[in-house]
């Protein structure tokens, strides 16, 4: 049976799409290869959000094709996902060793196309067309792949994005927003819980826009909050998370859901992008700094222990020193638990790429360093405040760095490493935090769980 190796670039949605493709192929009799060198099929699931991610995937494919050529192997090579969608046939024109280009609405066709390529029925396949109802096709899971996967699962609830931020390529690679139905999502979550999953993370490019077009608000609750309630009612599910939301989705109904739904973890990833109102407008974000900080205050009032993370872009076209100072001051004001900082990367066909006043690369680098240092100092201080406290964790499995230790996650989304063993996997337990490292806490379970 063919052996397949899938490498994923980019966000959790890409991870989830890759998992669904892997599960689909395993169900057809494929095995998962541990490395590209041992595979008959190599698929790269790509990201287009920044140029760096695209270049990494292109270079990787060139290297894989080069090594295979030297070893006189000819694995089937494929690009999937966002870059496949945006570049299409051009990928094969530039890299003739590539056999398959599979767009973002076509993941469920991977097995069918690979069969055709492997049995020689077709030589090359490019499919980046739109496909109705494709949002409901990312549903198969590979739960027995690792302990972590059986404890916590991602569920894709929608595809696409309608926000059209001026810097962002996603609406062009993922298409218009399309949402699955609530019963369909609940059925998938129920099945996962029956197979031992304790925590579910609902996924969407702007997850809070779920069902906006198709599911009317009820009792003042948006479609997304109705979905949260429905998932929350599943027996045996311990924790719910979601990502990635948009600040505009944090209406009072969602804040209220944090206060009412105990299984909804006190954790929120709220991409802010900039602290300058002028830039937020140019970015087409749809909120002001005041509105954003107002949401944070409400969330902290509803759940005082809430962990808040964000995404920030430095060097957006026209960003002045003053704009950048405002971003720094926002970071100090909010005191994020974690911040992902991106240097602005011009993306083809996006309005920002054509804006005058592109910020020089050197300035983007400098601002990146300054902001990183600021947020890292704040985050380190935040992590220190956990030392000596008790925290509830869901144990996910062996630690990645040291498999003799176990790792779990607090409700506010902090990783905790502790001395434990496989029998703890999937348990919700209390640990005492003894030490804080870089974005990791170290805990002692024995003190509290004798
Ligand atoms: N839901 C998110 C939001 O509210 O914007 C979008 C997720 S996006 C795929 C992940 C992050 O990539 C964005 O939040 C943004 O910070 C970053 N990003 C997107 N386009 C970018 C670009 N052209 N250059 C640099 N970073 C970018």
Image: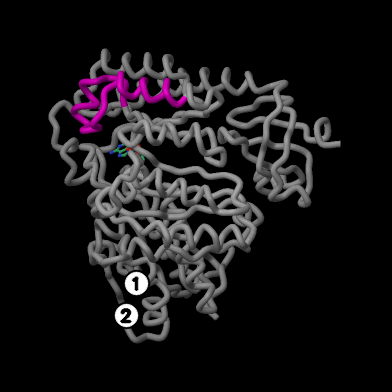
Label 1 – label 2 distance at C-alpha: 7 Å
Q: Residue at x 53, y 23 (%)?
A: 304
Q: In the rendered view of the protein, which quadrant contains the C terminus?
A: top right
Please name the residue that numbered disc 1 is placed on.
99
Disc 1 to disc 2: CB gap under 8 Å:
yes
Q: Residue at x 70, y 23 (%)?
A: 389
Q: Position of residue 312 (x, y in %)?
A: 36, 29
Q: Residue at x 62, y 39 (%)?
A: 409
Among all residues in the image, which is located at the extreme front? 219
Left/right of residue 153 with respect to residue 95 in the rendered view: right
Instruction: For mark 2, give the secondary structure.
Output: loop
Please name the residue that numbered disc 2 is placed on.
123
Q: Residue at x 55, y 53 (%)?
A: 234
| The magenta segment | 274-299
Find residue 403 and name its label.
Answer: none
Q: Is residue 342 visible?
A: no
* Magenta stretch: dominant secondary structure: helix
Left/right of residue 43 with respect to residue 430 in the rendered view: left
Q: Earlier in the sequence, mark 1 or mark 2?
A: 1
Among all residues in the image, which is located at the extreme right? 450
Q: Position of residue 394 (x, y in %)?
A: 66, 43
Q: Is residue 151 visible?
A: yes
């Amino acid at each position: 049976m063919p052996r397949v190796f899938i490498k994923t670039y980019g966000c959790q949605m890409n991870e989830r799409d890759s998992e669904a493709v892997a599960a689909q192929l395993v169900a057809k009799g494929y095995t998962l290869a541990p490395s590209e060198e041992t595979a008959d099929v190599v698929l790269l699931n790509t990201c287009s959000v920044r140029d760096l991610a695209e270049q990494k995937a292109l270079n990787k494919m060139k290297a894989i094709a080069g090594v295979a050529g030297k070893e006189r192997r000819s694995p089937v090579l494929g690009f999937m996902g966002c870059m496949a969608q945006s570049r299409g046939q051009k990928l094969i024109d530039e890299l003739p060793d590539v056999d398959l280009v599979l767009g973002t609405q076509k993941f469920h066709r991977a097995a069918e196309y690979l069969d055709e390529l492997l049995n020689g029925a077709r030589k090359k396949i490019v499919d980046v067309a739109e496909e109705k109802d494709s949002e409901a096709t990312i549903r198969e899971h590979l739960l027995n792949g690792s302990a972590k996967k059986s404890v916590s699962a991602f569920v894709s609830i929608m595809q696409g994005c309608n926000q059209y931020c001026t810097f962002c390529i996603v609406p062009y690679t993922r298409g218009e927003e399309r949402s699955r139905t609530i019963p369909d999502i609940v059925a998938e979550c129920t099945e996962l819980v029956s197979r031992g999953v304790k925590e579910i993370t609902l996924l969407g490019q702007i997850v809070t826009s779920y069902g906006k077009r198709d599911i009317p608000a009820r009792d003042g609750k948006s479609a997304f909050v109705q979905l949260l309630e429905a998932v929350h009612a599943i027996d045996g599910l311990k924790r719910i998370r979601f990502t990635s939301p948009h600040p505009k989705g944090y209406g009072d109904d969602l804040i209220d859901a944090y206060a009412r739904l105990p299984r909804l973890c006190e954790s929120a990833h709220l991409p802010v992008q900039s602290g300058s109102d002028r830039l937020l407008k140019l970015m087409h974000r749809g909120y002001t700094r005041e509105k954003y900080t107002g949401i944070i205050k409400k969330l902290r009032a509803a759940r005082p222990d809430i962990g808040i993370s964000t995404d920030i872009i430095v060097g957006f076209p026209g960003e002045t020193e003053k704009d950048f100072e405002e971003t720094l001051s926002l970071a100090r004001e909010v005191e994020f638990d974690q911040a992902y900082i991106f240097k602005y990367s011009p993306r083809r066909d996006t309005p920002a790429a054509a804006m005058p006043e592109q910020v020089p690369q050197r300035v983007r680098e400098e601002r990146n360093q300054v902001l990183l240092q600021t947020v890292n100092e704040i985050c380190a201080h935040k992590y220190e405040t956990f030392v000596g406290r008790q925290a509830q964790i869901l144990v996910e499995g062996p630690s990645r760095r040291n498999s003799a230790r176990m790792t779990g996650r607090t409700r506010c989304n902090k990783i905790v490493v502790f001395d434990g063993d496989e029998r703890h996997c999937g348990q919700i337990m209390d640990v005492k935090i003894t030490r804080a490292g870089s974005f990791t806490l170290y805990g002692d379970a024995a003190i509290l769980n004798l």
